[in-house]
Image (tube, grey):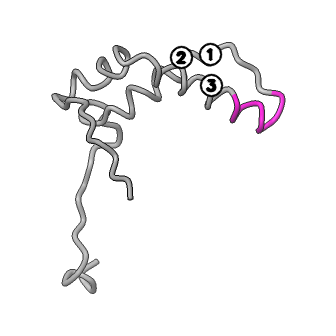
Amino acid sequence: MEDHADWLTVFYLPAYAPEPNPAETVWSLLKRSMVNFLATDLDDLAGMIKHRLEVIQHHPGVIDGCLAHTGLTFTTTPAITN
């Protein structure tokens, strides 16, 4: 690392820190919803993950709950169309 100190900065992070990362909470919800799911193949697993993420996406209260402990808020900006 010393050889690259002029352009490389190393940040040591905890092994697992879900508190500042709302995506960790979403993944936790996803994993709990799939606890008894048995995938027959990779496409089946991908389909289940997509479906469960869509369910979470359509429940803004759940997403707000994932953000609550981080101090972040969910705001949207208008899409730029040309």
Name of the residue lying farthest toward the front: 82
What percent of the width, then of the height, locates residue 52?
A: 58, 23
Q: Main secondary structure of the magenta part?
A: helix
Query: Vertically, is 35 above or below 16?
Result: above
Residue under the image location 37 percent in, 16 percent down: 62
Q: Is residue 73 left or right of residue 61?
A: left
Which amino acid, by three-letter code, is at mark 1?
Val
What percent of the width, then of the height, locates residue 63?
A: 36, 22
Q: Tell me how many marks there are.
A: 3
Which amino acid, by three-letter code, is at mark 3?
His
Residue under the image location 34 percent in, 46 percent down: 79
What percent of the width, then of the height, locates residue 2?
A: 24, 81
Look at mark 2 in the image and give the residue it sits on: 32
- Is residue 45 on the magenta stretch? yes
Query: Vertically, is 74 above or below 35?
Result: below
Which amino acid, by three-letter code, is at mark 2?
Arg
Mark 2 touches mark 1? (CB < 8 Å):
yes
How much space separates mark 1 and mark 3, taking CA atoms? 15 Å
Q: Residues within 10 Å of mark 1 (few under 14, many from 20)?
A: few
Name of the residue lying farthest toward the right: 40
Which of the two labelled residues, at mark 1 and mark 3, occupies the earlier sequence position?
Answer: 1
Looking at the rendered image, the disc whose residue lies closer to the viewer, 1 or 3, is 3
How much space separates mark 2 and mark 3, taking CA atoms? 14 Å
Say which mark, if any, is on residue 51: 3
Query: Vertically, is 5 above or below 12?
Result: below
Look at mark 1 in the image and give the residue it sits on: 35
- Given residues 53 and 60, the one toward you in this image is 60
Q: Secondary structure at mark 2?
A: helix
Mark 2 touches mark 3? (CB < 8 Å):
no
Name of the residue lying farthest toward the left: 71
Residue under the image location 26 percent in, 49 percent down: 13
Residue under the image location 46 percent in, 25 percent down: 57
